[in-house]
Image: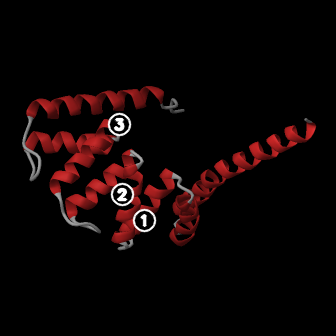
């Protein structure tokens, strides 16, 4: 019985380390990125992304897209979107809208921007509201829907402001 208890404890510890590692790699990657060490950031983020860490996938995709590696960037965004990640949907939508790394497909792009918006991705909500206000290729104008999205964006901004730490 005592041996089983130690085995369970070791198994739990191994799982805890496995879960913490991608988050730690992500944090090191973000610190490197903030310092301007893009190559170092990519190495740390790639390790975490390969382990399935969504924020690392989307940040690495962002960096790769800006560096001109649009095919790999689109694959990472696609993978994150398949797991219903707002940043993943938004990145995939931008790739589809512009044709960077994927065939241009405006209707699919707006579908993914809508999914990102539904998940609370504020830049996608703003973009969708503007696009619905004016109408875009693949998305007809709809003033009522545009107003609903604008109101949702305002509510999210107020919520964020209310939960932000007070400035000193």
Residue at disc 1, secondary structure: helix
Q: Position of residue 3 (x, y in %)?
A: 91, 41
Q: Position of residue 160 (x, y in %)?
A: 41, 31
Residue at disc 3, secondary structure: loop
Taking the image as shown, residue 11 lies to the left or right of residue 111, namely right
Residue 155 location, quadrant: top left
Which is closer to the viewer, label 2 or label 1?
2
Residue 9 visible here: yes
Residue 22 location, quadrant: bottom right
The residue singled out by tag 2 in the image is 78
Quadrant containing the C terminus in the rendered view: top right
Residue at (26% x, 66% y) in the render: 102
Report, in whole angstroms, how far the alpha carbon at label 2 lies from the one at label 3: 18 Å
Residue at (57% x, 55% y) in the render: 26
Q: Which mark is residue 63?
A: 1
Q: Position of residue 129 (x, y in %)?
A: 19, 39
Report, in whole angstroms, how far the alpha carbon at label 2 lies from the one at label 1: 15 Å
Residue at (54% x, 57% y) in the render: 30
Taking the image as shown, residue 115 lies to the left or right of residue 42, namely left
Taking the image as shown, residue 94 lies to the left or right of residue 10, namely left
Quadrant containing the N terminus in the rendered view: top right
**Mark 2 vs 3, N-terminal side:** 2
Callout 1 environment at 10 Å: few (<14), some (14 to 19), or many (20+)?
some
The residue singled out by tag 3 in the image is 120
Does residue 9 sit above or below 33 in this rendering?
A: above
**Mark 3 vs 1, N-terminal side:** 1
**Mark 2 vs 1, N-terminal side:** 1
């Amino acid at each position: 019985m005592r041996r089983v208890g130690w085995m369970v404890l070791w198994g739990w510890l191994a799982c805890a380390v496995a879960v913490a590692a991608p988050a730690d790699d992500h944090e090191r990657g973000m610190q490197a990125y903030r310092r301007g060490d893009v190559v170092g950031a990519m190495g740390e983020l790639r390790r975490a992304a390969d382990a399935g860490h969504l924020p690392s996938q989307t940040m690495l995709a962002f960096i790769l897209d800006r560096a001109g590696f649009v095919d790999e960037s689109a694959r990472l965004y696609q993978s994150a979107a398949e797991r219903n990640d707002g940043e993943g949907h938004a990145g995939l939508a931008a790739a589809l809208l512009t044709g960077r790394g994927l065939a241009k497909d405006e209707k699919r792009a707006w579908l993914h921007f809508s999914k990102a918006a539904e998940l609370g991705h504020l830049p996608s909500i703003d973009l969708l509201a503007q696009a619905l206000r004016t109408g875009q290729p693949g998305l007809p104008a709809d003033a009522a829907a545009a107003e609903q999205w604008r109101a949702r964006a305002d509510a999210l901004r107020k919520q964020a402001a209310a939960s932000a730490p007070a400035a000193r």
